[in-house]
Image: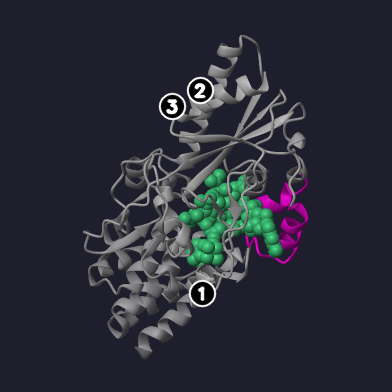
Amino acid sequence: MGSDVLSILRRHAQAHGLVGPFVARKLTPDTWESFCKWLDAGFAGDMVYLDRRRNERRDVRYLNPRARSLAVFALPYSCASPNTETMHSGLISPHAMGEDYHHRCRNALKRVVDALRTELGTHVDGWIHVDTAPILERDFARQAGLGWIGKNTLLINPDFGSRFHICEIALSIDIPATPVVVPDGCGACTRCLDSCPTGALVAPRVLDARRCISYLTIESKGSIPRDLRPALATRLFGCDACQEVCPWNQKATVRPFSDATTLAMDVVEILTLDEESFRSRFRSSPFERTGRTRLLRNAAVVAGNIRAQKATGPLLHLLKDTEPLLREHAAWALARVRGPEMAEAIQSAYERETDARARSDMALSLRDARES
Ligand code: B12
Ligand code: SF4
Ligand code: SF4
């Protein structure tokens, strides 16, 4: 029955653009201790949900007590060159383009499980996970033979590099593990560590999320540290520098799931969005998850980095936004875009500011504006 299950899963997964199944050897990860050390070192920043559910990551059966096997799938995504036609382009990581991958993987795997039940003619439980469950996905993907964990911490497959998402089905039946584990393909290479704009890869396979642009632009709900803002350059949402330089991505044959071509957005336009226009523009996209405040915060940083003169109006408007985070980042950007001309506006914003964090950051922006 095991091999029948594998071929049914493979056939239906393929029909939905997924590669797999790769079946894990066991339901416990090999690197849970390493994960705990990482948490204890504080590398997770504000991602408290990782610590809250750390014990559940010890064994898939904490989550799915009747699970007997774990089938892992990959969803490769497009890595087309950024479309930088807009005047004030903020880069969007290709993984975030098109339909939210959480929906896409979940819907595809639901159909795969339904097809499995129909073809086997019996009830099989299949619990679907994509990204958000307390499962060390790269660990299981590695032990299932999907790839190796690169020095940039990403799982790399020798055929399609690291640009893919990982999703799983925990099944209530036994299926045979994939016999091959992919050997390490990094060797002496250190390109990813050398090219990280913020030095977030503090050692091979160890990432300090607090410095990672992906974390700062997508996960972090707070202020982007002032010293790291310039390193974002034009990155509006996510970061791929440590993947772009990887030789395994350069030689990969990627099968994109998305036909999206827009990998950049005009930051000046983004800065004008109110809550309602944000929601209607980004419904069902990954930006909906992060919300208006974080996207506009990032857009202000990019506008400051590219010294977008046209952003002056929207940034001045944001000095009066209801979100202190936006007032703070708008002041920072204005100090970079128009320097001394903006000192008066920043001074007034500083004087009426009631949020302590925003106020202390604005004091520094005011100083910068006067000195520039
Ligand atoms: C938290 C999180 C983040 C955090 C932290 C990332 C990190 N490297 O830990 C932030 C927000 C920074 C992030 C960024 C990104 N993420 Co993310 N993220 C996650 C999430 C939810 C948990 C990962 C986690 O537990 N991290 C903690 C570390 C310690 O655990 P780990 O990376 O899983 O496993 C580690 C151990 O196995 C250890 N290890 C193994 N062998 C060895 C050997 C030695 C010697 C040592 C010291 C350690 C060690 O190293 C591994 C890597 O750190 C997963 C989904 C999931 N449920 O797993 C997605 C996930 C890892 N992310 C994903 C993606 C796509 C991204 C981004 C590419 C998005 C982007 N373009 O902006 C970036 C990539 C940044 C990078 N270089 O990793 C994909 C990765 C796909 C792949 N091919 O690997 C995942 C699997 C989501 C998914 N389902 O597709 N992410
Ligand atoms: S995603 Fe960007 S910031 Fe994060 S580790 Fe990779 S290169 Fe560094
Ligand atoms: S850039 Fe080099 S060291 Fe980094 S993940 Fe790719 S092969 Fe490994």
Q: Eyeballing the image, is 116 above or below 88?
A: above
Q: How far apart are marks 2 and 3 (CA)?
A: 10 Å
Which residue is denoted by mark 3 in the rendering?
A: 15
Q: Which amino acid does label 2 sit on?
A: Arg
The residue at label 2 has a CB less than 8 Å from ligand 1: no
Which residue is denoted by mark 2 in the rendering?
A: 111
Q: Which residue sits at x=78%, y=46%?
A: 55
The image's mark for residue 31 is none
The residue at label 1 has a CB less than 8 Å from ligand 3: no
Q: How far apart are marks 1 and 3 (CA)?
A: 39 Å
Q: What stretch is highlighted in magenta?
A: 31-55
Taking 181 as reference, is 296 left or right? left
Which residue is denoted by mark 1 in the rendering?
A: 194
Q: Examine the image and state in which quarter residue 48 appears.
A: bottom right
Give whichever of 158, 213 is nearer the camera.
158
Q: What residue type is labelled 1?
A: Asp
Q: Examine the image and state in which quarter residue 250 appears.
A: bottom left
Q: Position of residue 322 (x, y in %)?
A: 43, 58
Q: What residue type is labelled 3?
A: Ala
Dot placed on the residue nearer the N-terminal end, 1 or 3: 3
The residue at label 3 has a CB less than 8 Å from ligand 1: no
Report if residue 321 lies within the magenta region. Answer: no
Count neighbours of disc 2 (C-alpha within 10 A) and say few if under 14, some if 14 to 19, many if 20 or more. Answer: some
